[in-house]
Amino acid sequence: MSATQHQLVSIDVNSGVAMESQSGLQNLRPRIYGALATPPHDSKRIATIVMHPTSNFMGHYLLDALASRGIACLALNSRYAGNDALLLMEQVIKDLGAGVKWLRRHGYKKVVLIGNSGGAALASFYQAQAESLTAAEYPDGQPTHLIADDLPPVEGLIYSAAHAGRAKLLAQWLDPSVIDESDPLATDPLWDIYAKDAGAFAPDYIAAFRQAQLRRRDAIQEWVLGRLRMLTANPDGPQDQTFVVYRTHADPRFIDLALDANDRAPGSIWGDPRAVNYAANAMGRFNTLRSWLSQWSSLSRADGPENLAKTSVPALLMVHTADASTFPSTAKEWQEAGKDRLTSVQVKGGTHYLFKQPELVQFSADTFKDWIDRIRT
């Protein structure tokens, strides 16, 4: 039998916002890149796209797994691949739409989005806007210039190890023990879950800890909004600025396995959670005022389950039972949003990345194919 075919794809996208890239060429003529894997005899009846707001997915484990099962897969990168400091979710869905349009132009009749990890909320945001475009402005009030033609709707959504969204994730991971936003070491010991005596946490402490996380998030948000008001009051001056948010990896569930219990091992998907928390580069660390509002704030429009509830297409949820960053409560949010349109399948023992779990990659690909076959006809 002929081998799976591979193709490097480059796709032009409409110009973005000013200074969103250090490359003048990329800013004036945005171009995104992807890797397309196709089966030997591609009927072009259906194709999938797997995409993340910032991760490089061009080597994604699903590429060959799906193509070998007769399903074309485009692993697509956004213009922000590898650097989310300037990322605007409203621009990322434009990039994703360019990928959908590329597949349509190349003869594919139906398209299914695969939202893996942080790509899940992206897929939901995309389809919700494709079905009813409401994102006329960014959270800071500037126009997005999105038009319906940017966002052709797709026929289905697949979620795998699905985070509920960047804003929700930060709210659950932000370290409330920070007492000085300019000092990564300044700490209130009351909220330091990485202290030596930390372990199991009482329900009252967890409730108070979650409220302390929101207080810190809201304080950052108020500073961002105030700073933007000050800057934009002078139209001839700078309209944005960079800033750092320290210690963004402090969830009690990393330590206490009885919280939101599943089959996970202690710790973070990235190793020692305390080390990640204090790392020079971590989730939400580098930002601009505008990018922080779009990605991480309570004003972000890119909440996954909330957007899924606004869509009308069928959906599949793959629940990785040993995931250390998505939990039973996360799956419940997706299930309640998708209701009868959503099929939920457990990936028993599946970690977040299915690293060194080839049998579970095959199980996932088989499940995707069975589900896709039902909407392919």
Image (cartoon, grey):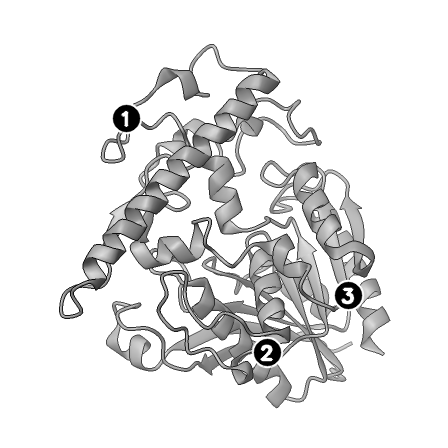
Real-space CA distance between mark 1 and mark 3, rounded to the nearest whole angstrom? 47 Å
Image check: 249 left or right of 52?
left
* Residue 375 lies in quadrant: bottom right
User: Mark 3 near mark 2, Cβ–Cβ under 8 Å?
Assistant: no
> Residue sitting at 36 percent across and 80 percent down?
15
Instruction: Estimate the spatial distance between the alpha carbons at disc 1 and disc 2, rounded to whole Å.
Output: 45 Å
Q: Position of residue 101 (x, y in %)?
A: 57, 83
- According to the picture, the residue beneath numbered tag 1 turns out to be 185
Q: Nearer the viewer, mark 3 or mark 2?
A: 3
Helix, strand or loop at disc 3?
A: loop
User: Which residue is painted at 42% across and 27% down in the image?
Assistant: 274
Is the residue marked by circle 2 packed among few (<14), some (14-19), or many (20+) residues within 10 Å?
Answer: many
Residue 58, above or below 25: above
Give the residue type that dot 1 points to. Leu
Identity, as a three-letter code, of the amino acid under mark 2: Val
Say if residue 228 shows up in the picture. yes
Image height check: is 220 above or below 126?
above
- On residue 314, the disc is 3
Report the number of discs. 3
Disc 3 from disc 2: Cα separation: 17 Å
Which of 320/135 is in front? 135
Q: What residue is pinned by disc 2?
A: 100
Q: Quadrant of the N terminus?
A: bottom right
Percent of width and height locating residue 155:
72, 74
